[in-house]
Image (cartoon, rainbow, N blue to C red):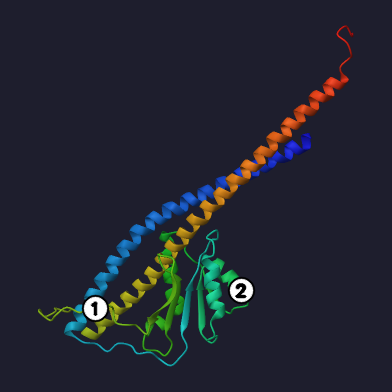
Amino acid sequence: MALRLHEFARRIAALSDIEEIVTAMRSLAFVELRRLIETIAHQSETTAARERAIGQLLAHYPQPLSVAGTGSDVLLAIGSERGFCGDFNTTLAALLQARQDGADRLLVVGARLALLLEDAGVAHEALGGATVSDEVPRVLQNIAAALGADLANRARTSGLVVLHHDSDGALAPVRLLPSPAPSGVPPARHTRLQLQLPPRELFERLMDQYLIGRLNAALLASLHAENRRRLEHTGAAIDRLDRELDVVQRQRRRARYEAITEEIEIMLLGAPDGPHAA
């Protein structure tokens, strides 16, 4: 019986340690989610400003935009670097496995997604992902280096498609190359622009910034969705741990009651008969 009580105590301690770790993960996800909301809002303002600048330039100096090429696409899939985020990576992996155009170059961000694809035998190139928003610039730099000429020359035959969870958790591919025209409506030509660069060069630079901004937004949106999933997943895990702890504690109390009852019975059985027994 003493051994059984010891096992219950060890199980309760283990569950309590796990719950403490999961609670800490949940708290970190909550803090990161709040930070990402502010960062994404600022990113949206920056992207809108770039779109307005491109729209103004195009209104005064129309520029030829890149057209779709005939080559295969580079597919950039953004998963998570850490786990404990539910089906965040498995849904991505399922879509990537279902793709029929196997000739595409697949560039994967996030160790967890890369591991799933490796286990499934899907050919890919892997890059480390961001665990917090402060790491997004580093990841963006690594993506730019890996894409190389595909970012340097938007008129080349291959294109760039990004597959990631958006801030609302939706999952859909977005084409970034060949570069589409920004969605903003160009303003009317009411004033003459004063340019320090030739219009074509300025347009190329603005489009480069626009493209990098879209990649940065995709990384931030994916990290936001990941932390939302982690918040939900850890909350459900804590609820399950609480229920299991309650069950084990009740079992332990029952075992202690049985142990005390057994001790009393042994004492009564070993006591001398009669009130005057020596």
- Tell me whether circle 2 and circle 1 mark residues in contact (CB < 8 Å): no
Residue that badge 2 annotates: 118
Mark before the other along the chain sequence, 2 or 1: 1
Residue 114, position as x, y percentages in the image:
56, 71
The furthest residue to the top: 276
- Most extreme residue toward the front is 274
The C terminus - image quarter:
top right
The residue depicted at 25 percent of the width and 76 percent of the height is: 184
Q: In this rendering, does residue 124 appear at all?
A: no
Residue 28 pos. (x, y %):
47, 51
Question: Relative to residue 230, is residue 209 depicted above or below?
Answer: below
Relative to residue 45, is residue 230 drawn left or right? Answer: right
Task: Indicate the secondary structure of the residue bearing disc 1.
Answer: helix
* Callout 2 amino acid: Glu
Classify 150 as above or below 218.
below
Q: In which quarter of the image is residue 124?
A: bottom right
- Residue at the image position 30 percent from the left and 87 percent from the top: 65
Which numbered dot is residue 145? none
Q: Position of residue 182 (x, y in %)?
A: 28, 78
Q: Residue 54 carries which label?
A: 1
